[in-house]
Amino acid sequence: MKTVLVTGGAGFIGSHIIDRLIERGDRVICVDNLITGTRENIKEHLSKPNFEFVHYDVSKPYFTETHIDFIFHFASPASPIDYQKLPIQTLKVGALGTHNMLGLSKQHSSGFLLASTSEVYGDPLIHPQNEDYWGNVNPIGPRGVYDEAKRFAEAITMAYHRYHNLDTRIVRIFNTFGPRMRKNDGRVVPAFINQALNNEPITVFGDGSQTRSFCFVLDLVEGLLKFMDSKEHYPINLGNPREMTILEFAKEIIGLTDSKSEIIFNPLPEDDPKVRQPDITRAKNILNWEPKYSLKDGLKATIDYFKKPQGNN
Ligand code: UDP
């Protein structure tokens, strides 16, 4: 039995990782300060003997005598609305939180996986984005607090790998969706689905020609577990290369929900990336991973979630 510590474990992706770790028999310590995560996401595990919840902000030093075999460092606000509301916390958890978790990893010689992001590519000038691209980020723009925190997090992770020989991994996660996203986190998937379910106007930003590529969370988690079990230290993109415009996506949601919503056009937020699509060649070659869920199946599961009372958190 491995002991795995998941920061941000009460959040959207973190809680899905925990489900799979518990299912395969690992012992899990979930550390979360609940500023964007919720107990609701982990409630089925709270009474289990191989699960422990620690209500704590990993931007402060954290040590434990319990031996840790592996750390998933997933704590961070992740929606553009959240990280602009919580800019200092976002910078701190990306910088200090990552430093603290690398310290814990050094103490226990544990494996370490950093949740990085496609945002390290900024508003990309190459398309699709592969891991060799260094990005096009505005450090002082509204998204800089997240983008630069994650870029720093990648740099310090590589430094601990190179100078302390830590067994680190870096995943760059592209747009991911599924049950347990927060209804009001401002991201396009929960926003459009909830607008459509309530027959309210669908708020497309700009003219809707910007593109995104959406990966279902259960596909992502399979990739993360394969990455955990690998020995690759350089970044790997995980995401679904199925690219579409935001306007196409709005129409897809209206169709799947049988909604009477109209589409309205609101101003495009500053520095909103115009295109985004992962090149997943490295994930295919190194991890033997690629996404399996169709967009429709993933969206149906997500729509069902938002129809239920627990989808209202
Ligand atoms: N978006 C939109 N309407 C919304 C929310 C988002 O048109 O109500 C657009 C947003 O401008 C961006 C895309 O959808 O181009 C994805 O936004 P999201 O906040 O989900 O994440 P991002 O990929 O920008 O980090």
Image (cartoon, helix red, strand yellow):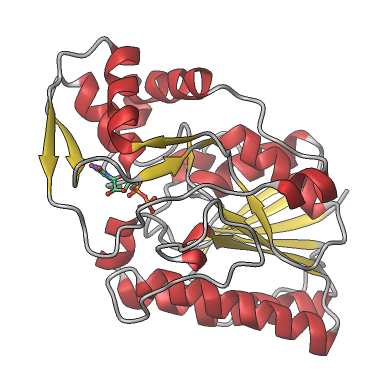
In percent of the image, x 44 and y 39: which residue is there?
A: 40
Considering depth in this image, is 275 or 5 the residue closer to the camera? 275
Instruction: Return the x and y of residue 289 as percentages of the image width and height.
Output: 76, 39
Residue in front for this viewpoint, 311 or 204: 204
Among all residues in the image, which is located at the extreme top? 258
Q: Position of residue 151 (x, y in %)?
A: 54, 75
Q: Residue furthest bottom?
A: 163
Q: Is residue 249 above or below residue 107?
A: above
Residue 302, position as x, y percentages in the image = 43, 25
197 left or right of 252?
left
Give me the residue at 58% from left, 38% from top: 240
Left or right position of 184 against 8: left
The quadrant in which residue 142 appears is bottom left
Does residue 313 show up?
A: no
- Image height of 300 relative to 90, above or below: above
Q: How many marks?
A: 0
Quarter residue 290 falls in: top right
Q: Nearer the viewer, residue 112 or 19?
A: 112
Q: Is residue 81 left or right of residue 240?
A: left
Q: Residue furthest front?
A: 126
Residue at horizontal 12 percent and vertical 45 percent from the top: 266
Residue 137 visible: yes
Which quadrant of the structure image shows residue 260? top left
Where residue 18 appears, as percent x and y from the top left, is 65, 44
Q: Is residue 213 above or below residue 193?
A: below
Question: Which residue is found at the position 30% from the left and 13% from the top?
Answer: 255
In which quadrant of the rendered image does the C terminus lie?
top left
